[in-house]
Image: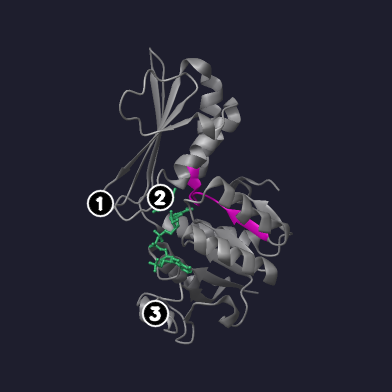
Amino acid sequence: MAIKVLINGAAGRMGRRLCCLAAEDEHMQLVGGLERVESPSIGKSLKELEPLLQCGDDIRLHSNLSDVSPQPDVIVDFSAPAASMKLAEEAASKGIALVIGTTGLTEEEDKKLHSHSAKVPMIHAMNYSLGVNLVFRLSADIAKALGDDFNIEIVEGHHNRKVDSPSGTAFGIADAVCAATGRTRADLVHGRSGQVGKRTRREIGMHAIRLGSIVGDHTIHFGSDFERIELTHKAQDRDVFAAGALRAAKWLAGKPPALYDMQDVLFGGK
Ligand SMILES: NC(=O)C1=CN([C@@H]2O[C@H](COP(=O)(O)OP(=O)(O)OC[C@H]3O[C@@H](n4cnc5c(N)ncnc54)[C@H](OP(=O)(O)O)[C@@H]3O)[C@@H](O)[C@H]2O)C=CC1
Ligand SMILES: O=C(O)C1=N[C@H](C(=O)O)C[C@H](O)C1
């Protein structure tokens, strides 16, 4: 049976691609989209919003989860921190699984968001591409193998409409390295400027560029006095994130409540 899927942030850059790919997927039934109540498109057919969409005229954009019929099995949410937090609470109370892609939440917000996984299965991945999830693993392995003589810096680049910095993915790479090497987020140093003094061995520099239409570039640099390694991932198209999130949605539907990871989807685990 097809999995009923609802897209939160449906009119956004990611939302539109998620709607299109979900509508084209024979194992999915797109039941609607959500946007904020102020959106001028509320009530409109998703097809009116996105001409590429292959679905019935009755699949609409709503501002309220309770207005969506039939109720979705899974919500895929790529919106904004406050929107994800509010929706997750409501989805959890209705027993709807959550695939969340929103970045830019504080550590406290993350904790609150993830607490709903006690009631419903949830994935909140900073990046849904296979390549980036391999970079998470490889970065941790390399950092562990190189030890303390190598400095680590992370540089990310995104389009000029991105509102959070550094990217969720840059945090994801840093978190993987921290977990592998006994560091914490307190060791991250963001965009040095002024008389900051010599870098410490432990610190991980975090740097962001915002430029034109970059879909998502991430490089982790490892450097000693004698040699350097650079591991780079470049996303070429947003569909890599959208397709990954829908793959996660299919994997998640019917799982018991818990906080899962894209690593579980791609490489097995829980
Ligand atoms: N994990 C991953 O693999 C990826 C994550 N992302 C993340 O996904 C998020 C969205 O990115 P992107 O699509 O580029 O951004 P957009 O701004 O294009 O889209 C976000 C959409 O969410 C809408 N929105 C805001 N508030 C609400 C609300 N209360 N209820 C419903 N919808 C709301 C926005 O509406 P409005 O314009 O009116 O504010 C907008 O249409 C970002 O956090 C981004 O970092 C992006 C790509 C990949
Ligand atoms: O906002 C974006 O566009 C992206 N956001 C995610 C992030 O913050 O890491 C993932 C991807 O790089 C695109």
User: Tag 1's secondary structure?
Assistant: loop
Q: Are marks 3 and 2 in contact (CB under 8 Å)?
A: no
User: Tag 2's secondary structure?
Assistant: loop
- How packed mark 1 is, by other alpha carbons closer than 10 Å (few <14, some 14-19, many 20 or more), is few
Report the front residue among 160 and 150.
Answer: 160
- Res. 164 mark: 2
Q: Which residue appears at 51% of the width and 26% of the height?
A: 142
Q: Which residue appears at 53% of the width and 34% of the height?
A: 185
- How packed mark 2 is, by other alpha carbons closer than 10 Å (few <14, some 14-19, many 20 or more), is few
Numbered disc in front, either 2 or 1: 2
Residue 204 is left or right of residue 96, and the answer is: left
Numbered disc total: 3
Report the front residue among 170 and 134.
Answer: 170
Magenta region: 121-132
Which of disc 1 and disc 3 is earlier in sequence?
Answer: 3
**Badge 2 amino acid:** Asp
Q: CA distance from mark 3 to mark 2?
A: 25 Å
User: Tag 3's secondary structure?
Assistant: loop
Q: Quadrant of residue 234?
A: top left
Ligand 1 is within 8 Å of the C-beta of the residue at disc 2: yes
Residue receiving disc 1: 212
Q: Residue furthest left?
A: 212
- Res. 41 mark: 3
Report the front residue among 187 and 28.
Answer: 187
Q: Is residue 92 above or below residue 262?
A: below
Q: Quadrant of ligand 1?
A: bottom left
